[in-house]
Image (cartoon, rainbow, N blue to C red):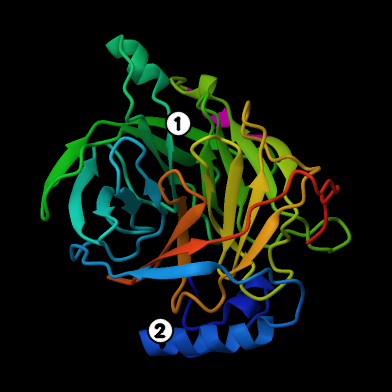
């Protein structure tokens, strides 16, 4: 979610208590909030370079796609993008294409949308094994990982076979596997998730976290190995890393999505105002901490809450999605990290 009752994200991120009249934000109010936050954001720190070749894609979605909270570009179906609504909506997986047209929706059997906030493309190890075949399409992983108030002890990830895109208005159904998990320390709000080639799910925390001295901490990185699927017990996510992104250290710096490149060598992590592109180890999709990330400034591109990110086909371009029915998507070309610029960046912002 972007903001509650038009509370600016800068203030939400810093955890300030604000007394405002209740009521939902209108689009005009949200735009005004974002413009105010953009003004606060300028010159606070290195915002990164502006993206090249920004292109807007008008969206012509079905009426029930009201959030567009994630983005997954298919590798088997050129030009097809999968997305989801967030909390409180039906358990539906949607498809669009790069013209912005509706390409169908599917109910995920046995699933509930408590707070769906993430989606990613990954392998289907157990499904492929049971079918004794290899499917190029892979699986869509849907993360019921959101937790704005950090109160849920258990969260869930669903895994469904990638469906074939359909005509406008189509509605179908998908069988799903589920993985219930918890964090080893405390509940976390997560909107950024990606999946490695071996099926390991990686989760990145969204909101400000404080250390014992009250200082803001870098975003935490947890993993769920593929071996956890198929168990009747709740898995415990493993804390393996942190990123040089400090949620709350600047206005709109909350992590809303992540996407691993098709070759597994790059990871794009987005906030409401920036994209960080990290070099990754292609053998395990872990961020290479000795390579400084490239930073792209998208603060002026989206007029409502920026939510999703995915690599645009097999290129260096990225596709961005935003909250709101029929809100345009954007394709941007951001700089990539240079492996020749070796610098230990852990713990910096």
Q: Split into 4 quadrants, where in the image is the C terminus?
A: bottom right
Extent of the magenta region: 233-238
Q: Say above or below: 299 vs 32.
A: above
Q: Say above or below: 10 vs 121.
A: below
Q: Exactly how many numbered labels are in the figure? A: 2
Residue 179, labelled with which disc? 1
Q: Is residue 26 visible?
A: no
Q: Residue at x 37, y 70 (%)?
A: 56
- Helix or strand or loop: what does disc 2 sit on? loop
**What residue is pinned by disc 2?**
25
Going from the N terminus, do you reach mark 2 or mark 1 first? Answer: 2
Q: Residue at x 26, y 54 (%)?
A: 97
The image quadrant that residue 130 belongs to is: top left
Determine whether, in the image, residue 93 is placed left or right of residue 13: left
Q: Is residue 252 visible?
A: yes
Residue 257 picture location, percent across and down: 52, 54
Determine whether, in the image, residue 44 is placed left or right of residue 20: right
């Amino acid at each position: 979610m972007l903001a509650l009752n038009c509370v600016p994200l800068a203030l939400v991120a810093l955890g300030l208590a604000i007394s405002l009249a209740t009521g939902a934000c209108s689009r005009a109010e949200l735009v005004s909030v974002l413009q105010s936050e953009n003004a606060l954001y300028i010159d606070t720190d290195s915002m990164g370079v502006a993206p090249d070749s920004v292109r807007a894609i008008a969206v012509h979605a079905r009426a029930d796609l009201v959030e567009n909270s994630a983005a997954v570009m298919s590798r088997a179906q050129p030009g097809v993008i999968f997305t989801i609504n967030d909390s409180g909506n039906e358990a539906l997986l949607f498809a669009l294409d790069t013209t912005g047209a509706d390409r169908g929706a599917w109910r995920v059997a046995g699933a509930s949308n408590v707070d769906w906030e993430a989606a990613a493309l990954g392998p289907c190890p157990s499904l492929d094994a049971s079918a004794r075949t290899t499917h190029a399409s892979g699986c869509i992983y849907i993360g019921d990982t959101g937790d704005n108030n950090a109160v849920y002890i258990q969260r869930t990830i669903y895994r469904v076979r990638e469906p074939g895109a359909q005509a406008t208005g189509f509605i179908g159904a998908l069988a799903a596997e589920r993985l219930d998990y918890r964090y080893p320390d405390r509940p976390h709000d997560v909107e950024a998730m990606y999946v490695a080639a071996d099926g390991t799910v990686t989760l990145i925390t969204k909101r400000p976290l404080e250390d014992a001295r009250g200082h803001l901490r870098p975003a935490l990185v947890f993993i769920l190995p593929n071996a956890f699927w198929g168990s009747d017990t709740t898995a415990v996510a493993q804390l393996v890393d942190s990123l040089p992104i400090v949620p709350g250290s600047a206005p709109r710096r909350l992590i809303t999505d992540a996407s691993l490149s098709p070759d597994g060598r790059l990871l794009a992590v987005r906030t409401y105002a920036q994209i960080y592109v990290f070099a990754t180890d292609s053998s395990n999709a872990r961020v290479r901490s000795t390579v400084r990330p490239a930073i792209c400034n998208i603060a002026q591109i989206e007029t409502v809450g920026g939510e999703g990110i995915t690599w645009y086909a097999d290129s260096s371009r990225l596709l961005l999605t935003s909250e709101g029915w029929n809100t345009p998507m954007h394709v941007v070309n951001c700089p990539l990290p240079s492996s020749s610029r070796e610098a230990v960046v852990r713990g910096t912002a």
